Amino acid sequence: MKNKIVYKNKWFSIKKFENYFVFDENQDQVVILPIINSKKIILVKQYRVPLMKFTLEFPAGGFNKNSEKPKIAAIRELFEETGINISQTKRLKQLKRMSVNPQRHSKIPYAYYVNITESEYKIRSKKISKEIKAVISLDFNKFIDFYQKGLIISSFMGNIFFNYLLLKKKIILKNINTNEKK
């Protein structure tokens, strides 16, 4: 099926496939799930214009695959949005790539997780992107609680987190057992 770009700007393109329209970012995307001591996750709070509200998300952003590798982009986004400096790409572990919206997007973001120490979190640079209002850490159960209550509204962030839990089966089994006892 042939596509035709019907609109393009610096950030995104609208493509038409016969009578079907697709929205795509003009850059590849990367998301990173930072985990503190295998117990907590780090989220950034930022304002999202389409929703006209602040959201809690994992550090993420765009990159040009011709000039930057996905792992390097993940490390850069982590630093820009949280102030946490990770210098070794081997610390990043890849998660399954999942579509943000398979109905309208053709690109699938790269996804990683990284284990950091509590001290790495505490000594992070406070000089972060102006787009970020706050950097917070939540234990896994609190993240699930926020997700259930609709305080984390990005289904993609939920997918990234639950993808990680499935990868680390012992964690998900522990959480299921804990919740069943309540």
Image (spheres, rainbow, N blue to C red):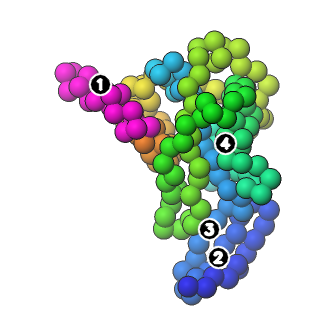
Disc 3 to disc 1, C-alpha distance: 39 Å
Q: Secondary structure at mark 4?
A: helix
- The amino acid at mark 2 is Lys
Determine the CA span between mark 4 and mark 1.
Answer: 30 Å
Q: Residue 87: name its quadrant.
A: top right
Q: Does dot 1 land on a helix, a strand or a loop?
A: helix
- In front: label 4 or label 2: 4
Q: Earlier in the sequence, mark 3 or mark 4?
A: 3
The quadrant of the image that shows the C terminus is: top left
Give the mark nearer the N terminus: 4 vs 2. Answer: 2
In this picture, is 39 found above or below 97?
A: above
Q: Earlier in the sequence, mark 4 or mark 1?
A: 4
- The tag earlier along the polypeptide, 2 or 1, is 2
Mark 2 neighbour class, 10 Å CA radius: few under 14, some 14 to 19, many 20 or more: many
- Name the amino acid, label 4: Lys
Give amino acid for label 3: Phe
Which residue lies at the image location 58% right of the left edge and 76% below the top edge?
21
Farthest residue in the left direction?
A: 181
Disc 2/disc 3 C-alpha distance (Å)? 6 Å
Q: Which residue is mark 4?
A: 71
Say above or below: 20 vs 81.
below
Task: State how many labels appear.
Answer: 4
Residue 105 position by quadrant: bottom right
Label 3, on which residue? 23
Label 1, on which residue? Answer: 174
The main secondary structure of the magenta stretch is: helix
Q: Secondary structure at mark 3?
A: strand
Q: Residue furthest front?
A: 90
Quadrant of the rendered image containing residue 91: top right
Between the C-alphas of marks 3 and 4, the distance is 25 Å
Q: Is residue 180 magenta?
A: yes
